[in-house]
Image (cartoon, grey):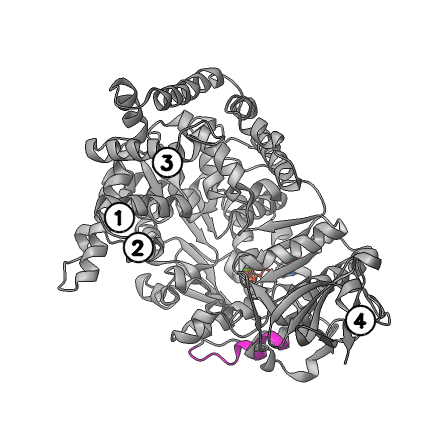
Amino acid sequence: MDVSHIFDRLNESQRQAVASPPGPLLVLAGAGSGKTRVLTYRVAWLVQALQMSPLSVLAVTFTNKAAQEMRGRIEEILGYSIGGMWIGTFHGIAHRLLRTHWREAGLKQEFQILDSDDQLRLIRRALKQLNMDDGYWPPKQVQWFINGHKEEGRRPQHIAETNDRQQDDLLRVYRTYEELCQRFGLVDFAELLLRAFELMKQNEVLRDLYQQRFHYVLVDEFQDTNSIQYEWLKLLASTHQNIFVVGDDDQSIYAWRGARIENIFQFEKDFKDTQIIRLEQNYRSTETILSAANAVIGNNRGRLGKNLWTEHDKGDPIRMYAAFNEVDEARFVVDRIQSWVDCGHARKDAAILYRSNAQSRVFEEILLDVGMPYRVYGGLRFFERAEIKDALAYLRLITSRQDDPSFERAVNMPPRGIGNKTMDLVRERARVNQIAYWDATLALIHGHELPSRSVQALTRFVELINSLDEQVQGLALAEQVDVMLCGSGLIAHYRKEKGEKAEMRVENLEELVTAARHFAHDPEDEVGTLPTFLTHAALEAGDAQAQRWEDCVQLMSLHSAKGLEFPLVFLTGLEEGLFPHQRSLQEAGRLEEERRLCYVGMTRAMRQLYLSYAEVRRLHGRESYTRPSRFLAELPSKLVEEIRDGFVMRPHGPAPDEKPESANGLRLGDRVHHSTFGEGVVLHVEGRGEYTRVQVNFADKGSKWLVLAYANLQIL
Ligand code: ATP
Ligand code: MG
């Protein structure tokens, strides 16, 4: 078999990894050294050189996007499709196992996935059932408690009662929450992993089956596996020991979600005769970017340490922009991207990265303003938008009447006269009789306990859902969605509303039909299309935008940028308290994780890297003066070029290298005096001519928006 086309595109150490004999192997190497490439080629090698069936391979990646990309690459190398091969995220694979073996896993066939919001709602319900006050027991804290235990593989019965009152109370909520999930067939994200693990652990027949089926197990981003994921991998690979993992200790960024960097060190001990391969050549970035990233991560202790080098040129310096505020920052970034595009580059080659998802909004606004297409990964995701969740709630309810979170969402959306009072009665009945809201509603309708108006409204709702269920039978997925959107009155509801926001919601709902149309259903999957689509919506939020075939600027949090690369990268919001994040300043070990995150961010850049911070930032509704991030001070100054005064705002988009003169000579950062408010600094200028408005931050009175024509400001 000629496999030279595989070897030609690898360096010596990479080749060694790709063609290593079966057995445990750990590739430990820095960013951009070809770890993912090696993993991909390894699969191709197994299939082509060793003639293994693609079905005998299990490849686990970290995001869905990464999984899709890997599948594409492997097919490219092989020259044919590997449709049946299992490539996916831990959650995706766990879900597939549970769908296939729901009975053995002790689940209902039509079990539904709870996303984080739904989970919080159910936790609130558990608290209520226990008469515990959700002011005293913040649901988020309970969620953290429950998920933390699940990630470590602990069910309530594994947690010993203590003398600690608080601990025991949390445990009671965990128990009640579990009962609710079980009763209504609901599975949260952590549960997916735990159940799949327990399934393998407890069911010998299935364990044997999958151990034999997946003769080769490969894992990317191994440094971010948590306990339960690692235990599950060990179960799968324990007999044949053909486990191939790649990772980088410097890129472990999910400790806050239970990831255990220790798994890298543990691997060698758990798998005897592990071969360790290091890759040292970086193929991604310019020398400048690589040196700067190495300098920053060099401030962390307890690293395994590595020597990364590149054959690439020095390239451009790293550019640092100190913005006046977050709007200025966003305008600067968008302006630079515009110049980049004007030079003939693709928009998709530019990425805006941020620490916190909330930062995306300002960028989105400016991008919309200038009409530049963009795509947001994570955070404000398509499937998380309110109207989409409304629509999904109907689809879920059609699929499973027992799904209470969906019942609650759909029952009065669009408004149909089912108020909180009526819902309280439904909830109460459900609690007392330990039944789902749907069944409680039926009982109330037949029990003549409600005012006739409520009975009528509830009856109409029940009939609506039943009738939608009938109507969608036998239809293709996209038509099912369409029928539901019209029948439920959702789309009509938003059409009636005025304004841009409502319009956007209608567009989003229409986009859902498109998403359904493009949803590729795996024919091997035994589950029907609608349930699979719903799970996809819960699990793979964000994909609907991602599949739109348009050249778009990429926006994402640093966490979701892991493993990716872009020619032009903007790392934004480098401010103390934002990045490094406030929480990390108080907890030991967290600062180092923030620094790793910074390293991940910088090493996404191939050719140009911009770093920016805002001197004043409004975030979560509060405005504050900031200090530049400590990570900026860790950069070797000879690699950095500062940009500041060459950038001025125009009413429609910024214009670099132009003398400031907008807004009657007023410019950002100017100190001004107002007869009532006193002295302040100009933060923002908007509009033109008589419509010009300025935002001024007054020393005593805080920030105010003023119409320039009337404000009578004096420049100091
Ligand atoms: P990260 O740690 O960020 O996940 P990685 O180690 O997985 O990075 P890859 O994404 O696999 O690195 O590779 C980085 C870039 O270098 C990719 O564009 C890849 O195609 C390229 N590359 C890797 N090895 C080689 C090689 N031998 N020849 C040419 N290009 C290579
Ligand atoms: Mg990688």
Q: Quadrant of ligand 1?
A: bottom right
Distance, label 2 to label 3, CA atoms, is: 25 Å
Q: Amino acid at mark 3?
A: Asn
- The residue range painted magenta reads 291-302
User: Which is more N-terminal, label 3 or label 2?
Assistant: 2
Question: Between tags 1 and 3, which lies in front?
Answer: 3
Q: Is 298 located above or below residue 339 in the figure?
A: below
Q: Is 76 located above or below residue 26 in the figure?
A: above
User: Which is more N-terminal, label 1 or label 2?
Assistant: 1
**Label 3 sits on residue:** 420
Residue 476 x, y percent position in the rendering: 54, 21
Secondary element at image label 4: loop
Q: Is the shortest distance between ligand 1 and the CB of mark 4 under 8 Å?
A: no
Q: CB under 8 Å between callouts 4 and 3?
A: no
Res 106 quadrant in image: top left
**Label 4 sits on residue:** 666
Distance, label 1 to label 3, CA atoms, is: 19 Å
